[in-house]
Image (spheres, coloured by chain):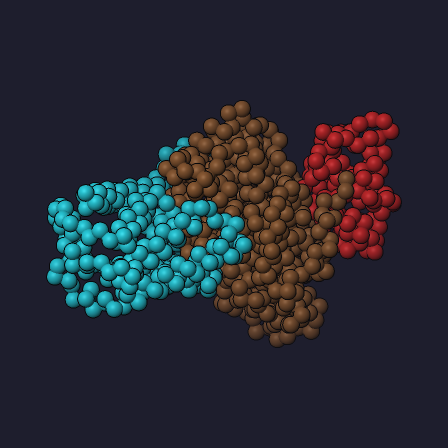
Amino acid sequence: MAAYDVNGTAVEHDEEGYITNLSDWTPELADVIAKAEEIEMDDERWAVVNFLREYYEEYQIAPAVRVLIKAIKKSMGPEVGNNKYMYELFPYGPAKQACKIAGLPKPTGCV
Amino acid sequence: MISTVYAVLFYVATVLLIVGTGMKVLKYARTPILLKIPVSPAPRTKRGVVLRMLREVLFFESLFKSNKWIWIFAYLFHYGMALVLLRHLRYFTDPVWWWVALIQPFGILAGFAMFAGLGGLMARRIFQPRIRYISNPSDYLMLALLMLIVFSGYSMKFLAHTDIIALKAYMLGLMRFQIGDLPTTLPLLVHLASVATLMIIFPISKLMHAPGLFFAPSRTMVDNARDKRFVSKWARNLPPLPEGIPTSEEG
Amino acid sequence: MAPLDKKADDDKFMDNPFVIPPLECGASLDTDTFKAYPEHNEALGFPGELLDNWKEVAIAKMGELAKRNRAFQVYLDTCVKCGACTDKCQYFLGTADPKNMPVARQDLLRSVYRRYYTFAGKYFPWLVGARDLTKEVLDEWYTYYHQCSQCRRCSVACPYGIDTAEISMAAREILDSVGVGQKYCNEIIAKLKKTGNNLGLNPKALAATLEDLEEDLEDETGVAVKIPLDVKGADILLITPSADFFAEPHIDGLLGYAKVFHSAGVSWTLSSYASEAANFGMFIGSYENMREVSWRIRQAAKDLGVKRIIFGECGHAWRVAYSFLNTLAGPFDFLDQNYPIPQHILEFTLDEIESGRLKIDKSRNDEFVMTYHDSCNVARGSAMGDKEGGQFDVPRAVIKAVCNNFHDMERDTIRENTFCCGGGGGLLTDDLMDLRIKGAKPRMTALKQVSDNHGVNKMAAICAICKTQFAKVMPKYGFEMDTIMSVHQLVANAVILDGQESDEAEEPTAEETP
């Protein structure tokens, strides 16, 4: 299986780039995944990633996009907390791409 | 000698056609249908299904909606052939039934329609890249065989005249298991041999589409799954599933 | 990782939705979908990995299916290669690969069936195009049977009703039975068996999500609209795709159902045990898995003691519900027989609208000029209402009741001739994005036509797959991702709840209050 290289340590991921062992996640890894996704991490993106991780910690699943946006709206204001902007931050979708960077499993189903 | 060979050929062909097709049809009928899978536009009643199938058989409705060229050629061919076959009843009936006598001239014309339809289908198979892509040798040969049947049939009328009276006597004889004398003109021998070939390959080829049409669940099922529970005989033997919710899984 | 859908960015519209491309052999040969891991396959009762004796097992399975399933048997025998279906598949129109022509897709399997199970194929293989089963053939099956969305558009066109979906389902079952499963479908079914839904949403997370949505509803309307979960003794059990708890615009549909139920004053509930309408067992052609997934709905209905079952907006789920549920999980003699079992949410909503119980302000949707995409499995594998064609007319009746502007797309792209969205049948996965974009081409072209000619700016659908697929694919064709809407999103916009704080001047609705 393929792996991300975080300062010389290999972190395994699946065919789509989601890490296979969720406890492997570190903030440094997030930067590496983001780079592979052609994304530069900034405060706004970190706010999303951190919220996803907190939510996952509590519920063992990623939040609905709407729930995510509402939370970001609360913490970062409506300019950031809206659907359109989320897709600017994560062009392949806040659900899938942001989850990948946050080290969460990929949401499956008709989503 | 030739009379006997052809007699045997026809007996064998007839048996194979009837038994072979009968066995296939029985197999279709006995194979369970697993689920309700009528395809739109699906009738809600049995009567609706009968009407739907009538429209399919009489007008080739689905084909008409999906491809006009194939429809024209297929229609000319199939209904031409139907008339031609009915016309041929005169060789097997004595006295000839009145309506068979009546359709004789139309039957002759219908042969041309049949040939034109076959020609059109053959041309599409050769020249239309999509259809050429999906064609196997047998697909061409089947059309060629049918065209040969028509061609040899017309040859008897227009090229090398055949003694039809003698032929009819031979055929009526065969039906009473008496082998008479078959006129041995080449077109007739070709005609009869190719017809026998068609009869023989019928049950082991795509010609089974004719009876198969009536066994396609997508067209023959009534769209009433909510009103009437349908369970296939295969599914009745499946192990039962638990009725309650397992507690370990309950949130 | 490079984005998966890069190569399709320059795809353009067709001149019309029916333009037939010149054949390009092998055009989508290397479009493959990820294979399932052993644990996914095993959870479904299949071998984890490719068996050593896969060839014998596959051939035997093929024979077994032909014996068990009349559709499969008859469809293998009766094709005359007339070619009427060759231009009907959206994946052929989109990819130009001749193996995506329905008959050619069937022939991938038919050729092998002939070799081992027919007289002609056994003794004259060259004559009838019969071929041996080899590893290459198996790979080819995997590739092209995962480029079929089982939408049945070709079956409508076929003079013998041959349904490629049946062949494709059988092919996938054969593949599964030798240990070659598709990751997308099998992972999801395995997840459903564990958590009750495709998403893997556990009851705690589901409850939290619903609470959050209730808050939104109250903020929006000022009315405490509930989205009940696991309420024993409720009248109605709502079974809806888990995407309705997660994705956009699906969630708006869910809010719509909640408003309709609230207005109707009925008691209803969701179930955390059967929190999924979708049934991917159908996609992989596995009767046993489909039955197991369906059975959860029966269990939940009994456990909660409901009287009715209603399904939310989900395309193939409605096919399984309408056409198969009674077979797979019936008889439902414990439910109220005065209502259809199961009922579609659109049937319920239309009843409410027609009876005048639902208060509607159509003008609230005036910014939208709507069209409607008939979801393939609803259109060709199910029905609604009690009249033939109800599956086409009921959704349109609801849309027209809540919207002033509606235009249908080109006739041969809707109703029983509708194109699949391009993501159905287990293809709604990122690894098939290229195929999904190409498969959506005819639909996107038809949408462009009504958009140009009638100013259509939104398209509604009643399928979770369609909604996700279009939200992803529309931007590739220059439409905003929110061009796709849930039908109940429109309903939600237009419905006026009793006691709702109106944002506009209230028309005389006072007569309604007793």
User: What's the residue at 57%, 39% (across, down)?
Assistant: C140
Q: Is residue C23 visible?
A: yes
Query: In which quarter of the view is residue C142 placed?
Result: top right
What tint does the image give chain A? Answer: red
Q: Nearer the viewer, residue C125 or C170?
A: C125
Which residue is most to the top?
C52
User: What's the residue at 71%, 68% (across, down)?
Assistant: C503
Task: Tell me: residue C369, above or below residue B161.
Answer: below
Percent across and percent down for residue C501 are: 68, 65
Left or right: B34 in relation to A39:
left
Left or right: C361 in relation to A56:
left
Query: In which quarter of the view is residue C41 placed?
Result: top right
Q: Is residue C209 visible?
A: no
Number of dots carrying numbers: 0
What tint does the image give chain C? Answer: brown
Q: Which image quarter is the N terminus of chain C in?
A: top right
Percent across and percent down for residue C420 are: 57, 54
Percent across and percent down for residue C313 are: 56, 54
Q: Nearer the viewer, residue C2 or C159?
A: C159
Query: In which quarter of the view is residue C82 placed?
Result: bottom left
Q: Nearer the viewer, residue C133 or C388?
A: C133
Task: Tell me: residue C342, above or below residue C181.
Answer: below
Left or right: A56 in relation to C404:
right
User: What's the residue at 35%, 61% (across, down)?
Assistant: B114
Percent across and percent down for residue B129 are: 54, 54
Q: Which image quarter is the C terminus of chain C in?
A: bottom right
Q: Nearer the viewer, residue C383 or C129?
A: C129
Q: Which chain is cyan?
A: B
User: What's the residue at 19%, 58% (across, down)?
Assistant: B163
